[in-house]
Image: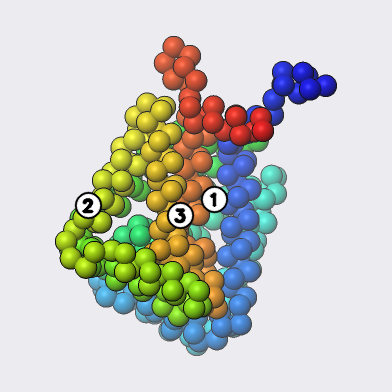
Amino acid sequence: MTAGIAAAPARLRITRRGIQIVLGLLWLLDGVLQFQPAMLTPRFATGVIAPAGAGQPGFIAVPVGEVARVIGSQPVTMDVAFGLIQLALGGGILCARTARPALAASVAWALLVWYLGEGLGGLAGGSASLLTGAPGAALLYAVLALVAAPRRGAAAAAESPARWAAAAWAALWLGGAVLQLLPGRDTNATISMSLAMSGSGAPAWFASIAAHLAALVPASGVSIAVDLIVLQAFAGIGALRGPRVRLAAVIVGCGLSLVYWVAGQGMGQPWSGLATDPNTAPLVVLLGFAVLGSARRGPAGEADPGRATLDALGAR
């Protein structure tokens, strides 16, 4: 029996259906978060929506402010509607028969939320970075839905994620490197401030972690900023290179994302009562898995290390 199992090891494959299932569960989580008691009050408008337009150009600030006004006037009705929409999207994606239309609907909803709920992820506000959650969770929901969307006539359960997932990953990380170069994000002091702010309003145990991390960053200079720029550039460029470099780039990117999730994004601040999603890092990690799952074999039949690693894990 042992020999038989060894001869046909289980294979851990990343398929479009696998990405859909994780995405559907995340939408369900977001829907549940909409029903937190604080979200059913005007705090949803004043503490979540309105800040997304603060310091942004008029084409963002004005519509975001109007949405905040409408939600603030009917917080229960609007919040319940948003929660039910997201629960429906999650359930629709989890059901194989309705996954295709649900994914399409999730792209439209995510882009709407990205604009009117997240203010385009703060990209035009002058302080956004991957460390603090750029380019916004909603945009990544839309990208992942497209990466996982089944092609017509294809079975999502056996189909690899879209090959352009690597290009999306590269754009994310190279864009993050560019953001890190811009004024207001390019010094150790600004990074330290972002780390300290991630603990604002957090429980004592997390606030102490944030304060400790902020204290580790040198008070002057640009050394940490340069390190982040180099790592982000490698994560982006490496995904477009050969199999071994791509695997290393995805590992670096996923590792950075998890560090950012704790150090800069406060793990989505679930303790605030106003969290609407887990922030961007879990979605970036999911995109990284999609990149590995979409990779083909190398030249002359060389096995892709990313796929081989997943196979080895599955065999265990």
First in sequence, mark 3 or 1: give its number: 1
> Residue 105 location, x and y as percent?
55, 55
Judge whether residue 101 can be spotted in this image: no
Of circles 3 and 1, which is in front? 3
The reply to whether the C-beta atoms of the residues labelled 3 and 2 are less than 8 Å apart is no
Secondary element at image label 1: helix
Q: Amino acid at mark 2?
A: Val
Residue appearing at x 62%, y 41% in the figure:
17
Whether 305 is drawn above or below 179: the answer is above
Q: Residue furthest top?
A: 300
Distance between the alpha carbons at the discs numbered 3 and 2: 19 Å
Of circles 2 and 1, which is in front? 2
Q: Is residue 304 left or right of residue 6?
A: left
> Residue 3 location, x and y as percent?
77, 18
Secondary element at image label 3: helix
First in sequence, mark 3 or 2: give its number: 2
Q: Is residue 148 left or right of residue 87?
A: left
Q: Amino acid at mark 1?
A: Ala
Distance between the alpha carbons at the discs numbered 3 and 1: 28 Å
Q: Quadrant of the N terminus?
A: top right
Could you say which disc has been placed on residue 104 in the image?
A: 1
Q: Amino acid at mark 3?
A: Leu
Q: Quadrant of the C terminus?
A: top right
Label 1 crowd bin: few (<14), some (14–19), many (20+), radius 10 Å: some
Distance between the alpha carbons at the discs numbered 2 and 1: 39 Å
Residue that badge 3 annotates:
258
Residue appearing at x 43%, y 84% in the figure:
46
Could you say which disc has been placed on residue 226 in the image?
A: 2
Residue appearing at x 37%, y 31% in the figure:
245
Quadrant assignment, res 137: bottom left
Quadrant assignment, res 213: bottom left
